[in-house]
Amino acid sequence: MRAIIIGGGKVGYFLVKTLLEKNMRVTLIEKDRERASQISKELDIDVLWGDGSDLSILQEANISDCELVAAVTGSDEENLVVCQIVKLSFKNSKTIARINNPKNIKMFRALGVDKTVCSTEVIANLINAEIVSDGIKILQTFEMGSMLLAEINIEAGHKWLNKEIKDIELPHNLVLVSIIRNDEVVYPKGDTRLHEEDKVVFVCDKETISGLKKYL
């Protein structure tokens, strides 16, 4: 997945770092030339110096090859303009806008912005929700991204299908939280058997989830 971040202030900077840790392809647009140069030297990403509401800058950033655009400048008005331009000109890209004044949330949504959020962590979580790898879907991050809430969908042929929890080999640092079955919550016990289409919700650290594939 590829994302374009508009705004290289503190929020944009740490959002970019978070997404890079998740192996996403990121392009940053920053209108302050010195700030753009500094970030370009510090992070291994494409940084464009320019106005994120400038259509030519967005095209230079290859927005047509981008699934998500997050406008996270310190100006609600600027973030809204960017998102509107993206929605009108590049309909395939989802838009996420940082909002500094909560009173603007309803207006942003009414004007077509896909998601409105007020913190870097929440923005990262929204993007994480789009990422599915090896059947694992990230639902939420905690502790600045070091801990994860995630789910595994038990499909036909899955290694865990029809097994009881006590018979499933799991990493030591992984804790099962619940099982979603037919839109109802089942709290896992040792003799709980997993069914097809169950969603197994768990918590672990990011190091554990990166090595979880061998257990699936």
Image (cartoon, rainbow, N blue to C red):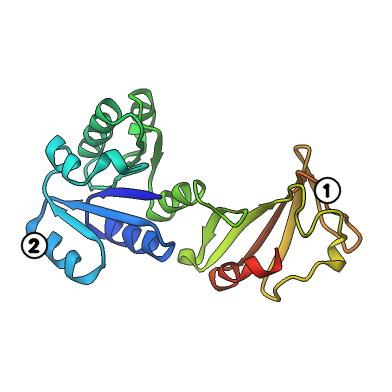
Question: Which residue, given by chain and number where applicable, does mark 2 sit on?
Answer: 34
**111 lies left or right of 58:** right
Q: Give the mark toward the camera: 2 or 1.
A: 1
Task: Give the residue displayed 15% in from the left and 35% down from the top.
Answer: 55
- Residue 145 picture location, percent across and down: 48, 64
Task: Give the residue displayed 31% in from the left and 55% down from the top.
Answer: 26
Q: Residue furthest left?
A: 33
Question: Which residue, given by chain and number where applicable, does mark 1 sit on?
Answer: 195
**Three-letter amino acid code of the residue under disc 1:** His
Image position of 99 with respect to 81: above or below: below
Q: Residues within 10 Å of mark 1 (few under 14, many from 20)?
A: some
Q: CA distance from mark 2 to mark 1?
A: 56 Å
Under tag 2, what secondary structure? helix
Q: How many numbered markers are drawn? A: 2
**Three-letter amino acid code of the residue under disc 2:** Glu
Q: Earlier in the sequence, mark 2 or mark 1?
A: 2
**8 lies left or right of 31:** right
Q: Nearer the viewer, residue 164 or 33?
A: 164
Image position of 65 with respect to 139: above or below: above
- Residue 2 picture location, percent across and down: 36, 50
Is residue 44 visible in the rendered image? The answer is yes
Q: Residues within 10 Å of mark 2 (few under 14, many from 20)?
A: few
- Residue 48 picture location, percent across and down: 15, 53
Q: Nearer the viewer, residue 129 or 32?
A: 129
Give the quadrant of the C terminus: bottom right
- Residue 116 picture location, percent across and down: 39, 38
Q: Residue furthest bottom?
A: 172
